[in-house]
Image: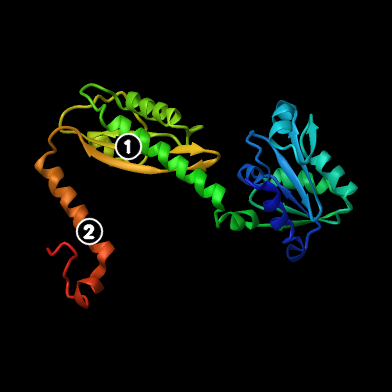
Amino acid sequence: MDHGLRRTRLASRLVELQADAFLLTRLPNVRYLTGFTGSNGQVLLTPGDAVFFTDGRYTEQARHEVPDLERVTYLDGFLEPVVQAAGRLAVGRLGFESEGLTFRTYEDLRAAAKGMELVPVGGEVERQRWVKDADELAALDRAQGATDDAFDAIVGRLRDGVTERELAFELEAEMRRAGAERSAFDTIVAFGPDAAEPHHEPTDRALARGDVVKMDFGALVDGYHADMTRTVGFGEPSAELRDVHDVVRRAHLWHVGGPARGGEGDGARPDGG
């Protein structure tokens, strides 16, 4: 990942943002710009410089993950060190992520940054992140690959008596075996009627023949998330479930094909029904 290039692109926007520097506090954006993977870090970005801040838990980790920036370790919050660095860099107008600070932190920053004008900035790094570079696409591909591999491994292990919690644990273990750092989000496994709950919390419900099995899961690789949902039948599905599946399939085909493809809105469907 070329973090330096990303910072340069963002710094080139400072003039238009009417800021001399930009304080980054949202962790996904800090990681995007530096490669830091810890749970506490901030970046002060100027047109020609950048300073990274974290607490003492991450001094060594930051040394390895952010070797190309000046690093500041603090004991009691990032506000004073950031303001001191901004003063040293002659910052008069300090941009900050408007979505990244609580009101209390904003008030504390305003009190600490006397003589500086605070400039709220919304969504600037997020817009830069919209277009993925080759490294990001490769990470997404690995994340989806680990997710696919986990599904392939688990679907053959469906068995009478396994619980939702057990199967969720097995899915997460298989994603890690396939190269994931961890799950991208809390894994959802739901059997039978539980599958009707979109965000079901796995329970000790045991799998039985005739159940549908819903799995909503994804792998996290290099900070990039995969997300996949699959519903499969265990044993012979009931006639009612087959009818529901057919209705959903036809609706999907209709949505994909659209009435225009069926002939000027004449109601023809892609499946010929």
Front position in the image: 23 or 144: 144
**Left or right side of 107 for 115:** right
- In the image, residue 42 sits, relative to residue 201, either above or below, namely below
Q: Position of residue 40 (x, y in %)?
A: 67, 35
Q: Quadrant of the C terminus?
A: bottom left
**Element under disc 1:** strand
The structure's colour scheme is rainbow
Q: Position of residue 81 (x, y in %)?
A: 83, 39
Query: Which residue is the site of mark 1?
Result: 215
Front position in the image: 54 or 178: 178
Amino acid identity at mark 1 = Met
Query: Which residue is the site of mark 2?
Result: 251
**Left or right side of 27 for 208:** left
At x 30% / y 34%, what residue is drawn? 190
**Left or right side of 94 for 169:** left
Front position in the image: 213 or 270: 270
**Element under disc 2:** helix
Q: Position of residue 149 (x, y in %)?
A: 36, 35
Please identify the quarter of the rendering in which residue 269 is found: bottom left
Amino acid identity at mark 2 = Ala
Q: Quadrant of the N terminus?
A: top right
Residue 217 visible here: no
Q: Position of residue 248 (x, y in %)?
A: 21, 53
Label 1: few (<14), some (14–19) or many (≥20) C-alpha neighbours in 10 Å: many
